[in-house]
Each structure stands twice: as C-alpha cells, then as structure tokens.
Amino acid sequence: MSAHSVARGHVAATRFPRATLREREALLLDLAASIPGAMFRLMHRAPGTWQFVYLSPGVEALFEVTPAQACGDHTALLGCILQEDRPAHDASVRAAVARSGPWEHEYRIRTGSGLVKWVHARARPTRTADRNVVWTGVFTDISDRKRIEAGLRASEATYRTLFETVAEGVVYQDRSGRITSANPAALRILGLTMDQMQGRTSLDPCWQAIHEDGTNFPGEEHPPMETLRTGFPVSGVVMGIWVPDRGYTWLMVNSMPVFTNDQVAAVYSSFEDITRQVVLTQELRRQATTDFLTGAANRRSLMESLKAEFERIRRHPELCCGILALDLDHFKRVNDTWGHTVGDAVLVHVTQLMRTETRLHDIVGRSGGEEFTLLLPDTDADAAVALAERLRRRVEHTPTVHEGQPIAITVSIGVSVMSAADVSTDDMLARADDALYEAKHSGRNAVRLR
C-alpha cells in the first residue's frame, strides 16, 4: 500500500472537493517524504502474524529495502538487524505487545551494501474494529547521534570537534542545571545566542515547553533535570519549545550524565529538530478524529469520547454528563434552494455557534449529515437544557449570511443525561434521539428532555 493510495482512500471516504483532494495528497506525500527516516503502519493479526500495510519512501534510504518488499514480507527489515541485537529487539516487541503499550527500541542494522546503522524505532498500538492491532510509528536513523555519544565518551578532543560541527544540538548544564555551553546547532535550532543561553536552566519559563498533547511540560521533568536528579540517561523524549519568531519547534531530546568521582557533576543533552515529523503526525491525527468540513469531532472520535466518559461515570457514580442530539430543521430546503455550497456554509456556521456556547472541554461532534451530538461532562439535566435553549435561540437569531443575504435556520435539540445507571452508551444515545424526535414532532425549533 502506498501513501498515495492511503491518502486517496481516506479522502474518498470523506468526500472532499477535487481541488482539496489533490492539495491534501500532495501535502501528505511531501511531508511523509521529507521526514528523516520512515513512517510505518504494521498490522498484528495474530501471534506471530505481522504485515506492513504502509511504509513511507524513506525506508529505502534507511534499510535499502523498498516499501513494496517490506510490505510483501515484513522479515525483509528484520533480516537487516545485527544478530547480536536481535534478542533485545524481539524482547522489546514482545513486552510492548504484552502490555498493549508504546514500543520504543534502538538497535543496529546492516544494509545490503554493508553499511551498519543505528535505528531508533517507536510506535503506538491501535485496535481496529475487527480486533486486529495496528502499530503506527517511525524508524529514524540515529547513527549520527550514536557516533556523537561514543565520541563524547571516548575523548574530549573528539567531543570538541563534534560539538562544534554536528547537525544535532548539544547543550551542557552544570550540577545546578545552569547551561554552561551550547554548540552552534543548538543555538540555530533554539533561535538564541550564547549570551541568551548562558546561565539559563530548564526551570526558566521562557521555554514554554509542552508535551505532544499540548499540556505543560514542567521544567523539573525535562530530560537533563531528570538525569541530574537520578544519574541515569534519558532518551527519546519529545518536547515542544517556544522559539522566538518561529513558534513551537519540536525536539527529540536525549540526556547523559557526566560523572566526577562517582557523582553526577553535569549533564549534556543532544537533540534534533523533528518539527516536520510531529506536525505530520498531528495532522494525520487531526484528520483521523475530525470532520473535514466543520472541524467538529467525527463520529469515530465522538464515540470514543462517549465511551471514555461512560467509563469515567461508572468509576465515579456521583458524576454525570449531559448529551445533546441536535438536528438542523428543514436543512434539505437550504440545499435545494441555495445549493450544497451554501448548505456547507450553514453547517460550518452552526458548528461555530455551538463552539461559542460550549466550554473548551465539551465535545461537539458531527454524527450525520446535518446531525450533531454534544457531550457535556459534569453537566446535569437542568444545565444541559439551559445550554440547549441558549443554543437554539442563538441559531434562530444568528442566520448565515451568503452574498449579503441572510439564510435563516433553526434547530431541534434532544437532551439526555448519562448516569451510572445506564447499561451502555446505546441507552443514553437512544434517550437523546427519542427526545430529538419529540422536539421535531412538536413543531421543530424546540428542546425536549428525556
């Protein structure tokens, strides 16, 4: 399977406009090809049964094996692993499969032309509807970093040469965590001068560091600080750092302790700029979880959130969650009168109104053509009905404007509340749908509670 076919299949399923399809395919293929290393998706159907279903073009430069060869026989990549590294590699895979958690490992390969390389592999599992598991991840050539680390350990003279010329950023911090030196690559990647770097610590709020999910990355948890605290190396940590005039730059960070008389005297960190890789991963994740037209959560993402909320309430029966089933009244008339382009604009407009009336942690999902479902955590029946009424009035009095012409629309809303007494998510959805049916049949532009 090629990146082209994956992109084509996904776009066809969501019915994008032809121009957008071409642009999106080109963007994804360009981003995938630009990643240093290779993206992959590996299907695990049963014990011992593995198959690559996608590999980006970078696999050929890394392993000297084509995507087609690896997709036809996954052992084509396994056969490149050095024999002495194979047991640890296989053990790490078994451990990740056993715990159904992320896999990450570094090992050496020998290519067909005899080159020995270090590979960093990382992947996360996702269970498919047919109970197979798909591992999605990246192979990265870390030969340069391994050579750097070996050189640093081997001799100070070798270190100094590499420190000044290597493409990866390298930063030294003393026992208190203060930065004492940084190589030119680090200054370039971080967009700072040595004067600006000198003396800073990981606790400085100017870094504005974040995790991949956007949450705060506290300074005391940065890899060099953890190494200073524990005396152990830290590797493969992804973090976003705010860079002046560029916004967030994403780094893959490794830290190594420096010992004096068996005590940690300093730490050096090496990092590479993986912004393109992270941006592509975020884009693919966004496309997998959001509705392309409106930006609302798609049905798959909505159902996953609903299930998670249901499990949360089962663990904490004192909690509740409001559910709104919303349908645009007489939406077919809009399409028939104004055309589907205007109909799409109405859907986007109503989605924006829903977002303005809801909280950041509420979930607005598009569950059908003109149907939406809203999840309102920690919201009881009274609050859910009040929100539904505000939203109904907001839509009624805020028409979509097309070429100066207001296009009025109303909505009918069914309200229900999830509780620990519910047997399944189907129960609460059925109640919300029944309430929506009542709202429709009471004359529309109405709110009903079940």
Image: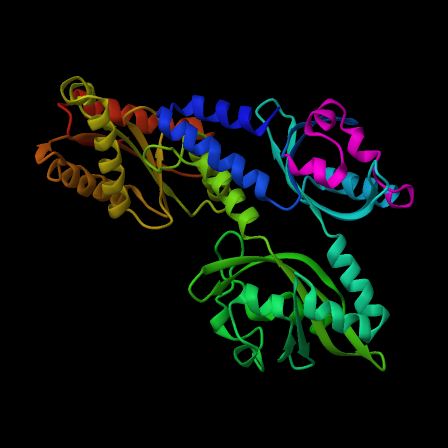
- Against 44, residue 192 (above or below) is below
Q: Which residues are magenta?
A: 57-85
Closest to the observer, 209 or 186: 186
Task: Indicate the position of residue 421 as horizontal and vertical percent values.
Answer: 44, 35
Residue at (79% x, 30% y) in the render? 76
The residue depicted at 47 percent of the width and 33 percent of the height is 26
Residue 422 visible somewhere in the drawing: no
- Please provide percent x and percent y for residue 237: 64, 57
What quarter of the picture does the N terminus occupy? top right
Q: Is residue 390 magenta?
A: no
Magenta stretch, overall SS: helix
Seen at 80% across and 77% down, the residue is: 259
Question: Looking at the image, which is closer to me, 344 or 354?
Answer: 344
Is 83 inside the magenta-drawn segment?
A: yes
Left or right of 58 in this view: 316: left
- In this rendering, the answer to whether 75 lies above or below 141 is above
Residue, far right: 84
> In percent of the image, x 73 and y 22: which residue is there?
72
Of residues 316 and 358, the one drawn nearer to the viewer in this rendering: 358
Which x, y percent locates residue 291? 38, 33
Q: Quadrant of residue 225?
A: bottom right
Position of residue 434 relative to residue 31, above or below, is above
**For residue 66, what is the image quadrant?**
top right
- Find residue 381 and report its horizontal and vertical position in percent: 29, 41
Q: Quadrant of residue 146?
A: bottom right
